[in-house]
Image: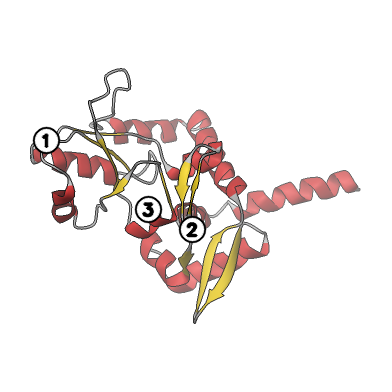
Amino acid sequence: MERIRLYDCLARIGKLVESPERIRIVDALCQAERSVESLSEVTGLPVRTVSHHLQKLKRDSFVVSEKRGRFSIYSIAGEDIAAFLEQMKQLSENIYPEMQLSLSKLRENRSLLNKSRLPVNPMLIDVRPVEEYEQAHIPGAVSVPFKNFEENMKTIPAGTPVIAYCRDKYCDFADRAVEILKKNGYKAWRIEDSVSARLADAEPLELKGKNENG
């Protein structure tokens, strides 16, 4: 009987992540804590849909919330949630050819940094929204949000080699930022390193309010 209950609990997780919308919401929360309205904006889902899925995620301990003024702010329940999502992504890439094909298409024109030929004194930039950067970022990174990027990149000294990263290897913010930088005379590359991957692997991050070194 207890063994059956254990498998029932495993099946609950399966039901929880069978919805692409819920996965998108959890993925967004791996970047930063958010209100329902903020999640609606970043995922493109209606507020009512986001609220509905959050209740399911909260009920099954994937997310937690706290009241701040008139808003409920949601976050992942722990770093093991980020690890679980990263493992899901990797497993999907390993077993589904369509995942591999889609990722290959994303990478076709991607200017990936060759780690054996690192530029001298590069500037590492985080092109995610500023609230995501403030929540957690790779040590040494500077916030240069992709929104209004052509204006924001004026903070990058001319002639400085630039390395950009965004939400994860599926995100194209960094690709588009690198393209704009190159058109404006910069040497630029992107890396596929990300905050969510580092959370999953317990690698160093600078977290809101403190430095975290693993």
Label 2 and label 3: CA atoms lie apart by 18 Å
| Eye-nearest disc, 1 or 3 | 1
Q: Which residue is mark 2?
A: 25
Q: Which residue is mark 1?
A: 159
Residue 38 x/y as whole percent? 41, 67
Label 1 and label 3: CA atoms lie apart by 24 Å
Badge 3 marks a residue whose secondary structure is helix
Assign the C terminus to one quadrant of the image. Answer: top right
Q: What label does residue 133 carry, if any?
A: 3
86 sits to left or right of 40: right
Query: Do tag 1 and tag 2 residues touch (Cβ < 8 Å)?
Result: no
Q: Residue at x 18, y 54 (%)?
A: 152
Q: Label 3 is placed on what type of residue?
A: Tyr
11 sits to left or right of 90: right
Query: Do tag 1 and tag 3 residues touch (Cβ < 8 Å)?
Result: no
114 sits to left or right of 133: left
Q: What label does residue 151 carry, if any?
A: none
Q: Is residue 80 visible?
A: yes
